Image (cartoon, coloured by chain):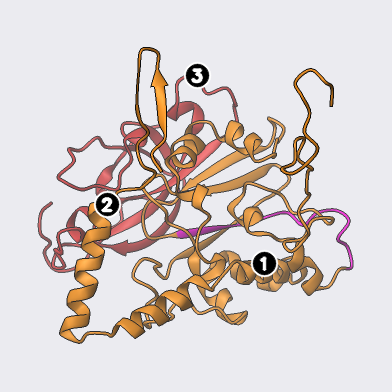
Chain colours: A red, B orange
Amino acid sequence: MESGETGDAPARFNVGDRVRVKDLPNLFYSRTQMYVRGVRGTIAARTYEDLLPEDEAWNRDDAQPEQFYIVRFRQKDLWDGYPFENDTLQTELPDRWLEPAGN
Amino acid sequence: MAQTHEHGDHSHPAAPMVEEISDFEILEIAVRELAIEKGLFTAEDHRKFTEWAEQIGPAGGSRLVAKAWVDPAFKARVLTDAVAACREIGIDWAEPTGQGTPSDYMELRVLEDTPTLHHVIVCTLCSCYPRPLLGHSPYWYRSPNYRRRLVRWPRHVLAEFGLILPPEVEIRVEDSNQKCRFMVLPLRPAGSENWTEEQLAEIVTRDCMIGVALPRPDRKADDVRPVHQASRPVGGEHHEPGSGP
């Protein structure tokens, strides 16, 4: 990951925005689960700004902090043939792992 | 004791029931011993911290839920700033270092159940758990079986805990994979009207705050557990096969 300039990266997403989880390469360490990659979800909450786990794992304290979000997915979107219409799953992801997804 | 077991035409000694120490356990011991040698802390400090961390237990979470049930203003604070609300009931997430323990960050979100929404928590990556409120997680919470199956088959896993919810109720799995910690605020059960906060806290067991059980007015954390008699008790009367029970 690129080392940061001064200041935090601006938070790009708001609660309710549709996003897709990127499928970035694993550079030795990641906390982005394989099962959410490429899947579309909705921003449920903004949590905090912090270093990416990929940077923190290597003590890159000068890297740029980013906004983290709780993202809500429909279970039917995560798993083929999931049989219950209403069920959902939430997990937390940093800004860099998300891209805008239309409705 | 070397027992053997057979594979048709041959038999060999059973593998001893000894778990190998993992690389991470070796690393932890090495770093700890170096820190003690360097004088950063003593072995006694380490023991005292371990003792402190392991005595926490889920009673703080039970008190938080009970107070939220009887005090709507407190509940509102729990849902907006849970770490501050914890301080009101005497639980400080900053203990013991001033910024929490090394893996319990100062980020807590309490997930409120409704008649149509039920939450359950998991950490698929390892074992993230709201330890200042609930103490150490149960062994099954850290098991690969629970972690990998809860996200994929939540209703099946909940059914194994004896919790079967109708399809209309949305089940929301919260996978705690970063620095937020989560706890479930379950629904107050019918039959607990006019109870005191202390009475209510008794029925909010650990599993209710993980989301694998619902509070019931007839089930307390310190209840005597049901005992089922063994069908063939040791030292009981011996029966020959075929002689009946």
- Please name the amino acid that badge 3 sits on: Gly
Q: Which mark is residue B62?
A: 1
B195 sits left or right of A19 in the view: right
Location of the N terminus of chain B by quadrant is: top left
Residue A95 coordinates in the image, percent (x, y): 29, 50
Whether residue B193 is in magenta: the answer is yes
Q: Can residue B24 be seen here?
A: yes
- Please name the amino acid that badge 2 sits on: Ser
Sequence-wise first label, 2 or 1 = 2
Residue B108 coordinates in the image, percent (x, y): 48, 64
Secondary structure at badge 1 equals helix
**Of tags 1 and 3, which is closer to the observer?**
1
Residue at point 46%, 38% (across, down): B145
> Which residues are the magenta region?
B181-194
**Residues at marks 2 and 1, CA–CA distance in whole angstroms:** 35 Å
Compare residues A98 and B16 and report the one nearer the observer.
B16
Q: Which residue is mark 2?
A: B22
Residue at point 42%, 60% (across, down): B180
Q: Which mark is residue A81?
A: 3
Query: Above or below — where is B108 with respect to A32?
Result: below
| Secondary structure character of the magenta stretch overall | loop
Residue A45 coordinates in the image, percent (x, y): 46, 54
- Disc 3: which chain? A
Query: Above or below — where is B171 with respect to B86?
Result: above
Query: Above or below — where is B34 with respect to B27?
Result: below
Secondary structure at badge 2 equals loop
Quarter of the image for residue A21 reads top left
A63 sits left or right of A102 in the view: left
Q: Which mark is residue B83?
A: none
Compare residues B230 and B165 and report the one nearer the observer.
B230
Location of the C terminus of chain B by quadrant is: top right
